[in-house]
Image (cartoon, grey):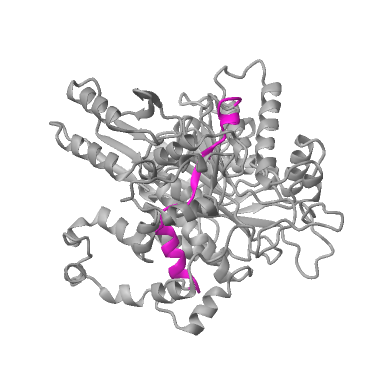
Amino acid sequence: MQTDNEKYNATVKPNTVFLNELKEKLPEFFTKDGSFDLDKFKDQLKDKNINELSEGYQLDFIGKDYARRQAGEMPSTVIVPDEEQNKGEGKNSKNLFFTGDNLEVLRHLQASYANKIDVIYIDPPYNTGQDDFAYPDTFEYTDDQLEDMFGLDDDQLARLKSIQGKSSHSAWLTFMYPRLQLAKHLLKRNGVIFISIDDNEDANLKEICDEIFGETNFLAQVVWERAYAPINLKKNFSPSHDYMLVYGRDANVIETNGIPRNSETDNRYQNPDNDPRGPWSSSDISVGPAIRSNIYPVTTPSGRVVEPPAGRSWRLSRKAFRERLADNRIWFGSDGNGVPRIKRFKSELHKTGITPMTIWHYKDVGHSQEATQKLQELMGGKKYFAYPKPVKLIQRAIQLYSNSNSIIMDFFAGSATTAEAVMQQNVIDGGHRHFIMVQLPEPTYQVDKKTKEPIFDKNGHKKPTKGGRIAFEDGYMTIDEISRERIRRAARKIRKDNELTLPENFDSSFKHYRVVKPTKQTLESIEDFDPNSINLFSDMVNSFSSDSLNISGDATGEQTILTTWLAQDGYSFDEKIHDYQFDNYHAYLVEDRLYLIDEGWGSTQTKELLNKLGKNELHLQSVVLFGYSFNISELRELESGLKQLDNKVNLIKRY
């Protein structure tokens, strides 16, 4: 049989995400069966310029419909808690680290973190053609399915599949599109996403972000000066910058905190005339090109008559100038003989920070070489990552758009710079921000692209990748292992450097989860499962344990299934779970939902449950059960009993 998610995914179309968003915002244009009433929508557009809709432009690329469909699909993986980490050093942490394909993780988080993320920063693959596509890029459908889903002919199908494993623009866009689409739904209404990129895909990224987030929600294209010296070996130009595209969920409600002030900026504010309103700075009041009505003579206190420079005018009208002059807001210099300047008081500054500009210099936010050196020092002198981002760079993004309780996400975690930036910012302002990191378990050893099996040398040892040799030799088998170790080392350094001032509740750890596909054997068992049979597959629950999935972490099958379901049902990863016993059967109670996962439920347990519900000893809205653990007679008895209750309790069967 098919799992519930497989059944749903079979109905997904390229426009499923769009229609769901449209239904949420414009429900009046949908029929009872959920279909979009196009004629009704067209009627509403008749007084508008319909040509704008047909003559507008958008970015098309091979694989776009496939990418749109991916954004609408449900996850095909399970979330396995790392019980060793989560009951150990991460026990009290609200920070999260997910090991797995970020597309699957984003799918899992759609319910539990929708509209909850304040800032997303990502540093995706730049598509430079240097084997930087480590993420899975194989199509999940047969040729017949692809042809049927997207109406492709044989030539179009060949072109679509040819983007696999290539650093083409289409491959990169197909890869990025669904991830950005899902990320958008996680942002708060005033949430902001920063995306690092270079010249190679900057233009294409801008196009798909305009489409996904909306052109009106574009906030800036930041230029980061990442190099402080030229590379003289370059034939023409030595690149000295990267970009960060910045988009908001809704620009109408987004406002920056500004860049925190320092002594240098504060020292610009003086009070040479002892103005009772306090310190101020002044700025030129001439502007260009000239506005004719604003060209007029001004007499200084010393009696000198001045006019705007040639081709310019005063920025203030005569009336506005007189008003500022009467309010002692015009400064002519200490001798009263200077060109007029307008006074701006420190007390009147917007919020507490300086409005950011779109060029970020390395002296303010760090450069690539500095970031590499600092990470190398932190990791014991070993260079595991070639181009990490500076902590100060990401810290600035966090400063601009987060508050003390914000959630910061990075689903291309890499060296986990974002996690350290969150912790460092909490040290600076006493905040309690939390991070969510996602990193693919990209191996540091070579893997056969077809079989996904390790490649061995003539001595039977795994062969390290070109860039992963040092990490491999130090015992790190995957990149995510290095990411988590970096967080631990950064946390230790922060604690050491701030031991006298760090608050007791400073969160310097994380909970860890692995997002993995069930084994082939489990999938075959699911395929053969007959829900109407009186016989059950034995140990189906245990097939989702860490041991059965061949990963570390010491999680039971029940813990994996429950964790996956809680995320699906919109609960956070620190939700309070109550153990509940029915005779010798162990169930889980979360708020008003009872989860039945293991085998062994029978008539005795059903009677006990119904008795507790009837006596109001237990208040439930839903009972959620693992269908593979129940035969047809057990299900019917439970379903029948719940229907007879005065207070309706929903029975949800999941496969």
Q: Is residue 207 visible?
A: yes
Residue 42's quadrant in the figure?
A: bottom left
Q: Is residue 522 left or right of residue 532?
A: right
Report x, y in % for residue 556.
52, 34
Q: Residue at 65% of width from left, 34% of height from top?
A: 487
508 vs 531: above or below: above
Q: Which residues are magenta?
A: 61-89
Residue 328's quadrant in the figure?
A: top left
Report x, y in % for residue 573.
46, 34
189 vs 571: above or below: below
Q: Is residue 223 left or right of residue 607?
A: right
Of residues 406 and 162, which is closer to you in this image? 162
The outermost residue toward the right is 459
Q: Residue at 54% of width from left, 20% of height from top?
A: 505
Report x, y in % for residue 375.
74, 40
Report x, y in % for residue 195.
55, 53
Residue 270 magenta-highlighted: no
Q: Is residue 270 visible?
A: no
